[in-house]
């Protein structure tokens, strides 16, 4: 049997000791996730004020003071699906009559 170099034996013993001791480390529990901070609620559109628009013609909307950012959704046009709680949506039927008002 061949004799091994003492430096090789030392490195081998040190490596084995490190591997054995690494299994003895204390495992830290995962940190608790921080509570999500709720964004301040945006004021919703004033829906009750605009319910009286239902039944009006689209042409009459020209004479009504509507909030900034409102949109008129016609039956034959496409609209984005993004939700903006402060935006007033006015739905108009094919005969150009307001059929619905909603926030979003």
Image (cartoon, rainbow, N blue to C red):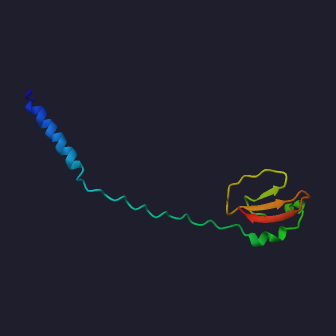
Which residue is pictured at 31% across the width and 57% down the height? Answer: 28
Q: Is residue 63 visible?
A: no
Q: Relative to 80, is 36 on the left or the right?
A: left
Which residue is pictured at 60% across the width and 67% down the height? Answer: 41
Residue 47: percent from left, percent from top: 74, 69
Residue 62: percent from left, percent from top: 86, 60
Q: Relative to 93, is 71 on the left or the right?
A: left
Q: Is residue 103 visible?
A: yes
Q: Nearer the viewer, residue 99 or 19?
A: 19
In the rendered view, would you say 15 is above or below 23?
above
Q: Relative to 88, is 20 on the left or the right?
A: left
User: What is the quadrant of the C terminus in the image?
Assistant: bottom right
Toward the front, the furthest residue is 1
Which residue is pictured at 67% across the width and 58% down the height? Answer: 83
Q: Nearer the viewer, residue 35 or 41?
A: 35
In the rendered view, would you say 84 is above or below 4?
below
How many numbered discs sit on the rendered protein? Answer: 0
Q: Nearer the viewer, residue 95 or 63?
A: 95
Toward the top, the furthest residue is 2
Q: Relative to 18, is 46 on the left or the right?
A: right
User: What is the quadrant of the N terminus in the image?
Assistant: top left
The part of the image, by quadrant, that contains residue 44 is bottom right
Residue 53: percent from left, percent from top: 84, 68
Toward the bottom, the furthest residue is 48
Residue 31: percent from left, percent from top: 37, 59
Q: Nearer the viewer, residue 43 or 19?
A: 19
Which residue is pictured at 68% across the width and 55% down the height? Answer: 82
The part of the image, by quadrant, that contains residue 40 is bottom right
């Amino acid at each position: 049997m061949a004799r091994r170099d003492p430096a090789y034996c030392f490195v081998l013993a040190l490596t084995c000791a490190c591997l054995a001791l690494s299994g003895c480390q204390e495992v830290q529990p995962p940190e608790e996730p921080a509570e999500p901070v709720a964004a301040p609620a945006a004021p919703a559109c004033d829906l009750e004020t605009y319910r009286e628009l239902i039944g009006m013609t689209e042409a009459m909307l020209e004479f009504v003071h509507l909030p900034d950012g409102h949109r008129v959704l016609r039956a034959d046009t496409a609209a984005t699906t993004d939700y903006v709680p402060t935006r007033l949506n006015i739905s108009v039927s094919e005969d150009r009559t307001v059929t619905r008002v909603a926030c979003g």
